[in-house]
Image (cartoon, grey):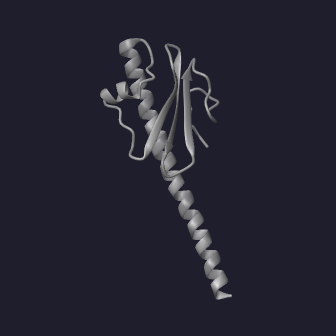
Amino acid sequence: MVVTILGLLASIAVNRLTSSRDRSFVTVMKSDLRNFAVAQESYFYDYSVYTGDLAALEARGFQLSPGDSLAINEATVLGWSATTQHMNTTVRCYVFVQGAAPVGTATKEGHISCG
């Protein structure tokens, strides 16, 4: 009986730890997407087009957090969309702006959605 109770408590603790860890990854991914948006707008100000080249933004000072990856799904003069994911979670975050097509779970322009 004691072993069963200890096993149940351990299971609850592991689930809470995993959930907490995923929330921290999501917070970092959202921050990366906000910083990416600022970098895209800065690039657009200079070149009148959004870039699909992450290296071009990195050359201007944009940096991803360690463990995160970012995919630019679309980048034109009309808008852009991007997806980010951390290597230690299956959760992804999405955002699109202006004329870009919605991506992933993002349904409202400019709002970051994770799922």
Q: Is residue 40 left or right of residue 93?
A: left
Q: Nearer the viewer, residue 86 or 9?
A: 86
Residue 98 vertical placement versus 26 (above, below): above
Residue depicted at 59% across the width and 26% down the height: 109
| Foreground of the two, 110 or 43 | 43
Residue at (53, 58) in percent of width and height: 20
Q: For residue 48, what is the image quadrant?
A: top left
The answer to whether residue 112 of the structure is visible from this angle is: no
Q: Examine the image and state in which quarter residue 31 appears.
A: top left
Residue 17, placed above or below residue 74: below
> Seen in the image, is 52 located left or right of residue 95?
left
Depicted 5 relative to depicted 44: above or below: below
Specify whether residue 76 is in view. yes
Q: Position of residue 64 (x, y in %)?
A: 39, 39
Instruction: State the quadrant of the N terminus.
Output: bottom right
> Measuring 48% from the left and 46% from the top, which residue is drawn there?
86
- Report the number of numbered marks: 0
Single out the residue that lies furthest toward the bottom: 1
Position of residue 86 in the picture relative to residue 107 (left or right): left
Residue 12: percent from left, percent from top: 61, 69
Residue drawn at (38%, 46%) of the image: 66
Identity of the residue furthest to the right in this view:
1
Q: Position of residue 35 (x, y in %)?
A: 41, 33
Quarter of the image with the C terminus is: top right
Q: Quadrant of residue 55?
A: top left
